[in-house]
Amino acid sequence: MAERKKLYEGKAKILYATEDPNVLVSYFKDDATAFNAQKRGTIVNKGKINNAVSTHLFQLLEAEGIPTHWLQSPNEREMWVKPVTIVPLEVVVRNLAAGSLCRQTGLGLGTALTPPLVEFYYKKDELGDPLLTRDRIRAMAIASDEIVHQLDTLARRINQILIDFFNGCSITLVDFKLEFGTLTDGTLVLADEISPDTCRLWNQNETDIARRVMDKDRFRQDLGDVESGYQQVLDRILAHTN
Ligand code: C5P
């Protein structure tokens, strides 16, 4: 195959063009960053695990009628995806309070959020990905009210599908981040990845607060055994799927 043109290198993935304009390659790296890249490290095999987890979840969501950018995952590190124009919003869904929500509001860790919160953050590293309001999104002309409404609806549907799926794996879906893009015909599709890097996942078989964490908080908070937390998420997904 001809050498691929690198289109973009992010913190966790590299995006390459292919000879086919309808196919891009997303290459999953082992690099880990947190706190807007102030903390950096490597999690052995993270790229492979995140590709496998994302692949399963995208296939699950597609089967439930949620359009995604996923095309195929031909090997452990690569996901082939449809080219999209990314909506510069990070859509965070929260079922239980954790992370920045606790820091910013004083809500206790694990407080149930009913109905779940859907929040929009501006994808802009230089500004530290600030939390937006709908009025701010309108003032900044980032997305129309209609797109914001569609994102909210899609995020809530995805949340319900993922809550049910992870419950079947004895995992609690605490919160997660989604990114969306538009295809050339304007269709909104789920993009990026859904993995232990982008979700908080708690092991329902553990009551100990530190031991129950199966996601990137193990890296953020130096809890140790980061790779085994990620691997356990994948193992449970595979066991539940097969
Ligand atoms: O940091 P915060 O508590 O706002 O994160 C909420 C959720 O969104 C967490 O699951 C976190 O992993 C995810 N997130 C992400 N990428 C970001 C910000 C948050 O995957 N840039």
Image (cartoon, helix red, strand yellow):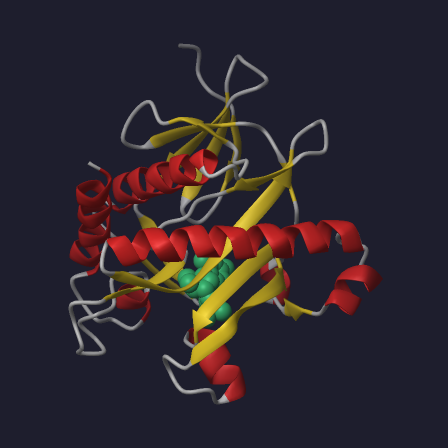
Query: How many numbered marks have been drawn onto this rendered protein structure?
Result: 0
> Does the rendering let one see residue 155?
yes
Residue at screen point 48% across, 45% down: 10
Is 105 placed left or right of 150 in the picture? left
Q: In the rendered image of this protein, does residue 28 appear above or below residue 97?
A: above
In percent of the image, x 61 and y 63: which residue is there? 121
| Position of residue 3 in the picture relative to residue 203 (left or right) | right
Viewer-side residue, 1 vs 198: 198
Q: Quadrant of residue 199?
A: bottom left
Question: Could you say where residue 211 lies in the image, as x and y percent from the top left?
Answer: 17, 72
Looking at the rendering, in which quadrant would you find the N terminus?
A: top left
Q: Residue 229: where, in percent of width, then height?
A: 20, 58
- Image spot of residue 126 (x, y percent): 62, 61
Residue 197 seen in this snapshot: no
User: Dividing the picture into quarters, in which one does residue 57 lie?
Assistant: top left
Task: Please give the name of the residue rendered at 36% of the width and 30% of the height, measured from the top-left corner.
Answer: 78
Of residue 204 and residue 19, the one placed in the foreground of this image is 204
> Which of these two is toward me, 122 or 5?
122
Image quarter hosting the C terminus? top left
Q: Is residue 91 above or below residue 116?
A: above
Q: Position of residue 197 (x, y in %)?
A: 36, 55
Residue most toward the bottom? 106
**Is 116 situated left or right of 215 in this image?**
right
